[in-house]
Amino acid sequence: MSVIYGLWLRELKRYVRSRAQIVASLGQPLLYLLVLGFGLGPVFQKAGQGNYVQFVAPGIIAMTVLFSSVFSGMGLLWDRQFGFLKETLVAPVPRIQVMLGRTLGAAAVAVFQGLLVAAVCFIAGFRPVDIKALPLVLLLMGLIACLFAALGTAIGSVIENIQGFQLVMNFLVLPIFFLSGALYPLNNLPKVLGVITSLDPLAYGVDGLRTILIGMSHFGLAADVSVLVLVATAFLVLGSYLFSKIQV
Amino acid sequence: MIQVENLVKKFGEFTAVDHISFHVAPGEIFAFLGPNGAGKTTTIKMLTTLLRPTGGTLEIDGLDPNEHPNEVRKRFGIVFQDPSLDGDMTGYENMELHAIFYHVPRKLRPERVEKLLRLFELWDRRKDQVKLFSGGMKRRLEIARGLLHTPKILFLDEPTLGLDPQTRNQLWTHVKHLNQTEGVTVFLTTHYMDEADRVAHRIAIIDHGKIVAQGTPEELKQQTGANSLEEAFLALTGSAIRDEAATSADQLRQVAKMWGNRR
C-alpha cells in the first residue's frame, strides 16, 4: 500500500515543482475558452443555443483533464528515457502496485489541473447552475482522469520512444477531444459523426459535466457514469497488464 | 546462488548473449569482465527480471526469474550502469522511495538513509533535486541507494564508472564488508582490471556474447602466462579497440521491440 502512496505522492511532487509546466498547460484551455468562447459566442447565440461560454466551459474542463491525464500517464516515457523506470521495475513489489501508484498520481494531477481551469472559467464568466454539485463534479473529473491516465500508462508501456508521443497526440488524443462534443452540441449531428461520438469515452465525461454544471444532458447522467466506470476499469486492467510486460 | 545454463538472448538477428553458462556460489564475489558490447549488461538484465531470455535456463537462489519475478526481486539489489534516479526528486526522496520499495521498516529508514548519505558525502545536498547534482554525485547516490537494504545478491553493473579513486575505494571497502559480515553474494561487472583483481573471488571473461575464460584471477593469469589480469584480459579478448557495439545493438533492439516481438 505504501508503494502506491509513495508513487502517487511522487507524481504530485513532480507536478508542484514544475511551475513552468503548470502555467504552460493553462495556456491552451485559456485560448479555447477565450477565442472560441467569445469568438463563436455571437453565432451560437443567433442559432438560439444560448451563451457559448456557458456551454463550452464544461468541455474545456474535460479537455484539460483529458490532456493532463494522458500526458501524465505517458510520463512513463520520460522515466524510461531518464532511467528511473528500471528502478521501479526491479523493485520487489507487484508491478500492479507500481502501475496503480503512477496512474492514480497522474489522475490526481489531472483533477487538480481541471479545478484550476474551472476557476479560470469562473473568472471568465462561467456560472454553474448549482454550486452544491461540486462533489459530483469532482467525482466525474476523477473518473475521466483515471480513465485517461490508465490509457496513458497503457500507451507508455507499449511505445518506447518520445517520438511516438506526437503520433499519439495527433491520432488519438486530439480526435478524442474533437469528437467528444466538448465544442459543439451532440444533438442533430450527421449520423456517422453521431455514431463515432457515442464510441468516444470523453463524450460521456463532457456530457456528465454538462448535465451537472449547466443542466444540459444528451446521454443521461446514469449512462455517463456507467460508461466512464466501465471503460476506466477496462483501461486500468489493460494498463496493468501491459505495464507488467515491460522489458527494458 | 546463481545458475546459468546455455543462456541466449537475441535482438532480432543480433545475438547479444550466445549460450553462456556459469555458476556463482553463495557468498562469492563474482566479476564479469568484457569489452564494450560484450553482453554483460544484457546478462544482468536477464538475471534481474528486466529482460526475458531467448533460450537457456536461469536460476537465482533456486528460482526462475521468469516464473517468479517478484520472489526473485526480493532477493537482489542492483546498481545500474546507466542512471536510474528521479531527477525531479531530492536526494533524500530518492533514497526514501527506494526504502519503501525494498520494505525497509519505517523506523529504520531515517537512520539508514542518513548513514549512507553521509558515507558517500551527499548528506549536505540531500534537499537538492537530483538534476542539480554533478555526474559523480549522481553516481554516488545510485550506489548509496543500492546499499540501503541488505539483499542476498548484489548486482553491480560498472558501479565505479566515472568515480574518483576515493569513492571507488569507499565502495569496494563497503562491498567487501557486506560480503564478509552478511554473506552477500556479489555479481559485478567492471572495466577496471585492478578492481576485479582486488575484490573478486572468481572471474568470467565474456566477449562477443560468449564466455571465453572462467576462473580465479590467479588461474586466468596462469592460463595465459600473463603477469597481470590486464594482460590476461587482452590475451583473451584481443587488443583491438572496439566500436561501441552496444550502440548498434541498442538500435537493433529498439527496432525489434517497437514493432511487435514482445512476449
Image (spheres, rainbow, N blue to C red):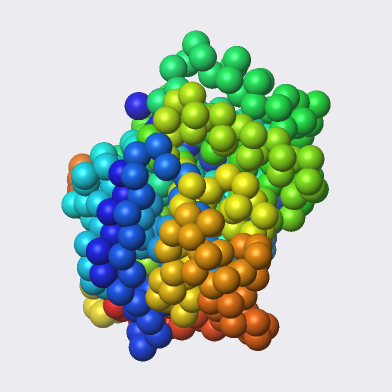
Residue B86 on image: x %, y %:
61, 45
Residue A26 on image: x %, y %:
66, 51
Query: Is residue B162 visible to the viewer in this orientation of the structure?
Result: yes
Tell me which residue sits at (24%, 78%) in the image.
A191
Quadrant where the N terminus of chain B sits is top left
Tell me which residue sits at (80%, 26%) in the image.
B124
Looking at the image, is A245 positioned above or below residue B113? below
Quadrant where the C terminus of chain B sits is bottom left
- Number of numbered discs on residues: 0
Residue A172 on image: x %, y %:
41, 71
Residue B249 on image: x %, y %:
49, 80
* Viewer-nearest residue: B76 or A192: B76
* Viewer-nearest residue: B7 or A50: B7
Looking at the image, is A162 positioned above or below residue A70? below
* Viewer-nearest residue: A71 or B68: B68
Tell me which residue sits at (61%, 23%) in the image.
B113
Q: Is residue A232 left or right of residue A72?
A: left
Tell me which residue sits at (66%, 59%) in the image.
B192
In which quarter of the view is residue B93 placed?
top right
Looking at the image, is A180 positioned above or below residue A128? below
Q: Is residue B131 left or right of residue A43?
A: right
* Viewer-nearest residue: B6 or A107: B6
Query: Is residue B101 visible to the viewer in this orientation of the structure?
Result: no
Q: Residue furthest bottom?
A: B13
